[in-house]
Image: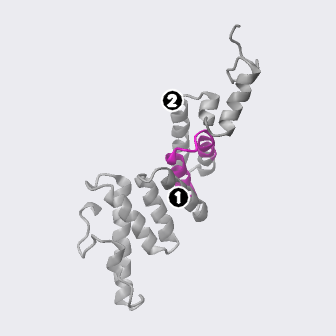
Amino acid sequence: MRSRYFMTDSILKVNTEQELVDLIRKTAEGELTLQQFFEFSNEDIDHMALLANALYEEERYDDALVILEGLIALNDKDSRYYNAAGAIFIQQEKYDEAYEALTKSLELDPNNLDAYVNRGEVFLVNSRLEEAAADFEKAISMDPREENPSANRARQLVWGMYQFLQECEKQGLLDPDFDINSLHEEIDDDKPSNLG
């Protein structure tokens, strides 16, 4: 039997109707990603991700989000896409959506340093200081050499939180039982060396 496209105007490469049914079933059951279903190469996916990033850099957040949603549909196991979507939601001040996307990113990859920093910022904006500090601390601990820009941003944010809370403490605005030093184990009165 010669090989042919089952559906002549389709991008799906199958030889029989049964192959098509099996391909659809495997995709529906999660055995195959949409990337595998459509036979997109990793290079194709990388180009789409680069386009989403370029749109983000141009502050075309809605367009970037469309690309990212497509990438998530193609492969919902890649934490980077959820992190990028979370970053867009932060820019759009959609903090609930950002939290959901970033938490999903961290469920998929608990070592995604950028997602910890981004989610920490969501916590910070929502005055959830202890949770923000915990996410920032996790990111900082993943970068002991102080080389990662996101971890260094987390260091700056923790330092800023600490200074703000010190001032609140001086003015009597904090609960007396609140220990500002509990927010970051390594902070002391000295400015961190990487803050410039």
Q: Main secondary structure of the magenta part?
A: helix
Q: Quadrant of the N terminus?
A: top right
- Give the percent coordinates (x, y) of residue 174: 41, 87
- Give the percent coordinates (x, y) of residue 92: 59, 59
The verdict on residue 67 being magenta is yes
State the separation of the CA atoms marked 2 and 1.
Answer: 27 Å
The verdict on residue 76 being magenta is yes
- Mark 2 and mark 1 residues within 8 Å of each other at the beta carbon: no
- Give the percent coordinates (x, y) of residue 18: 74, 23
Relative side of 142 to 42, left or right: left
Residue stretch rendered in magenta on the structure: 66-91
- Give the percent coordinates (x, y) of residue 48: 56, 36
Relative side of 65 to 106, left or right: right
Relative side of 69 to 148, left or right: right
Tag 2's secondary structure? helix
Depth order, front residue of 164/127: 127
Whether 168 is drawn above or below 119: the answer is below
Task: Give the residue displayed 51% in from the left and 31% down from the top.
Answer: 42
**Residue type marked 2:** Glu
Q: Which residue is mark 2?
A: 43
Relative side of 38 to 160, left or right: right
Picture disc at residue 114: none
**Residue type marked 1:** Thr
Whichever of callouts 2 and 1 sits on the residue coming sooner in the sequence is 2
Tag 1's secondary structure? helix
Q: Which residue is mark 1?
A: 103
Depth order, front residue of 101/156: 101
